[in-house]
Image (cartoon, rainbow, N blue to C red):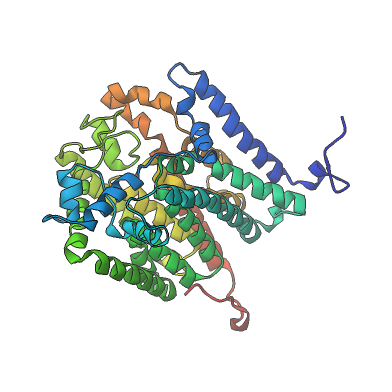
Amino acid sequence: MSKLSFAGHDLFEELSPLARWLAVFAIANLVAVTVVLIALPSTGWRDVAPYDVARFLTFRSTFDSWGPIREAWLYLQDPGDDAVYQAVFFDAGTKFQYALTSLLPIEAMMLVLPGDDVRFGPLELVSWFAMWVTAVFVALIFLRSLDQYTPQYAPRSTPERLLLAATAMGMTLTFYPLAKATSLGQIQTWINALFAILVWLWMSRRPVHAGIVGGVICAIKPQLGLLLLWGLLRRQWGFSGAFAATLGVIGMVTLGLYGLEHNLDYLHVLSYISRHGESYYPNQSINGLLNRLLDNGPNRDFDVNAFPPYDATVYIGTIVTSVIIVAAALLWRAGEHRSASAFDLLIAALSFTIASPVAWEHHYGVLMPMYAMLLPAMLRWPVFGSWTLPVLGVSYVLSSHFFDVAQEAAGTPLLTPVQSYLLVAAFLVLAMLYAIRHREAADADAQPEPDAARMPATAT
């Protein structure tokens, strides 16, 4: 059998070991793990990641975000005496948990396609394209990270560059949290794409543009507003100013459309969610872990109209761990990250996600750009010795699949931590990011001061 050739050259001779092994790992992870899972008696074909990937590719989704958003928008067209969150979230029991800025896509769509009712097709089309945008920018992040951290592993030829980009895109499109967001019909798909763009802009030393994107993300998901505080503490004035200005403009538009009372009512929702959280197993947060461990609320069934009852242990445990995680991201070893490296940014974003009382599986789509940056960096700095790449690989396998077999632990509260495998993967990534940031800072401190005339522009 003749070897595969490309433009007159043996393709495999053109490829580095990294390109070969990454492609093999990606295929083995997708195929082998899926086959093993389907072979289990408890797992059906609807319970594996490729099912959600197939739904994305065939443009099929539900209305997990758009249904509640539509209900809130319709209420505000002819509001009653109660504020929107009181009427929709508390009285009707619809889990509309977004800020009113999330209604702006519907407002924009109705300007272009006016009618008597909201149609989901255009919104889902944007989500479908957002998934591809995420894949493209993850590939760009990976290639830039190779060039920046491990130039010896950077693509040596066009075929290799194309293969590495295609591998990164394929791993992104089949990454379970990302595919799940699209399959559910989640506005999180937009956030995942925007976050990948933000990371790429930061790596490209465009902090102002990154701040604009960050402001848009925060308008959709207020928890990530802590990135503004991160920027201020790092004295990243361009990023912080653009972030605040963008968020301010979007906020003023929302305030003008819906009024002060309806917007302020969102604070009641945030307070309520922080006191209750979610016990349903896809909530991969400390709050979800504690609720399940204490058998406080439904585990395997999602209650679309209710939350688990208030539990003081869960509430206090959530608050304490959230404060620790957020404070560490913002303040720990501040002297090491005055330059606000890309890894420091990723630490902040992942910490704020983990620390949220509700962190659904699809919220961890933000992990994919992190893996794209981590692999080259960990080749340069093997922070865990011979375990470095295995730890990275285990984390990726845990986060890139849905393990329905883990839900068998639902009937035994003491075993329910097994259900938090995605949270474990996220903490592994967080540990790797901290370790890499420390090594990067140590290397920077060890370098002699460059000539001022030759210093690159800083991300300010």
Q: Residue at x 53, y 38 (%)?
A: 58
Q: How far across and down, in percent of the image, does residue 32 sit?
A: 59, 27
Q: How far across and down, in percent of the image, does residue 31 sit?
A: 59, 29
Q: Residue at x 32, y 57 (%)?
A: 103
Quarter location, residue 106: bottom left
Q: Residue furthest bottom?
A: 453
Height in image: 330 above or below 298? below
Q: How far across and down, in percent of the image, does residue 10 sit?
A: 85, 43
Q: Nearer the viewer, residue 330 or 140?
A: 140
Q: Is residue 339 visible?
A: yes
**In the figure, is residue 35 to the left or right of 44?**
right
Q: How many marks?
A: 0
Q: Nearer the viewer, residue 374 or 439?
A: 374
Location of the N terminus (image quadrant)? top right
Q: Nearer the viewer, residue 221 or 353?
A: 221
Q: Residue at x 22, y 38 (%)?
A: 305
Q: Nearer the viewer, residue 175 or 75?
A: 75
**In the figure, is residue 297 to the left or right of 435?**
left
Q: Residue furthest top?
A: 41
**In the figure, is residue 397 to the left or right of 353?**
right
Height in image: 82 above or below 304? below
Q: Is residue 431 visible?
A: no
Q: How far across and down, in percent of the image, does residue 336 sit?
A: 44, 64
Quarter location, residue 292: top left
